[in-house]
Amino acid sequence: MATKLLEKYGNSITNFSLTPSGGGVYEVEKNGKLIFSKKSLDRFPELDEIITLIDEK
């Protein structure tokens, strides 16, 4: 997913990080705001879903 996001947004991304975690946590933030939480929704996101959330926020 990270590769696809970097391909789509290219140089418009100024900061991108992956943080290893445990306990089934998978969260996506944009500008310090949580836009997706696997822990809250109990499922992984789809790529198109993350793109939509990034573009909306």
Image (cartoon, helix red, strand yellow):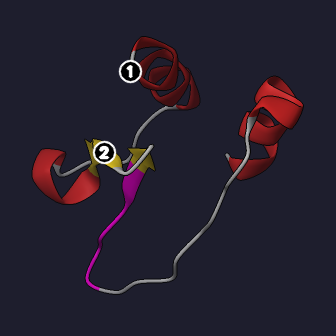
Percent from the top left, x then y, of residue 26?
Answer: 37, 62
Left or right: residue 43 compared with residue 48: left
Q: Main secondary structure of the magenta part?
A: loop
Compared with 32, 45 (above or below) is: above
Left or right: residue 37 compared with residue 46: left
Percent from the top left, x then y, of residue 34?
Answer: 28, 46
Percent from the top left, x then y, of residue 40?
Answer: 12, 51
The answer to which image quadrant residue 57 occupies is top left
Which residue is disc 2 drawn over?
33
Q: Earlier in the sequence, mark 1 or mark 2?
A: 2
Mark 1 surroundings within 10 Å by alpha-carbon count, few (fewer than 14), some (14 through 19), many (20 or more): few
The answer to which image quadrant residue 30 occupies is top left
Give the spatial CA distance, label 1 vs label 2. Answer: 9 Å
Q: Amino acid at mark 2?
A: Lys
Asked if the residues shown at circle 1 and circle 2 are in contact, with their CB atoms under 8 angstroms apart, the answer is: yes
Residue at 72% over, 36% down: 5
| Residue 4 forms part of the magenta stretch | no
What is the secondary structure assignment of the residue under circle 1? loop
Residue located farthest toward the left when viewing the structure as drawn: 40
Mark 2 surroundings within 10 Å by alpha-carbon count, few (fewer than 14), some (14 through 19), many (20 or more): few
The magenta stretch is 23-28
Q: Amino acid at mark 1?
A: Lys
Which residue is disc 1 drawn over?
57
Residue at 73% over, 39% down: 13
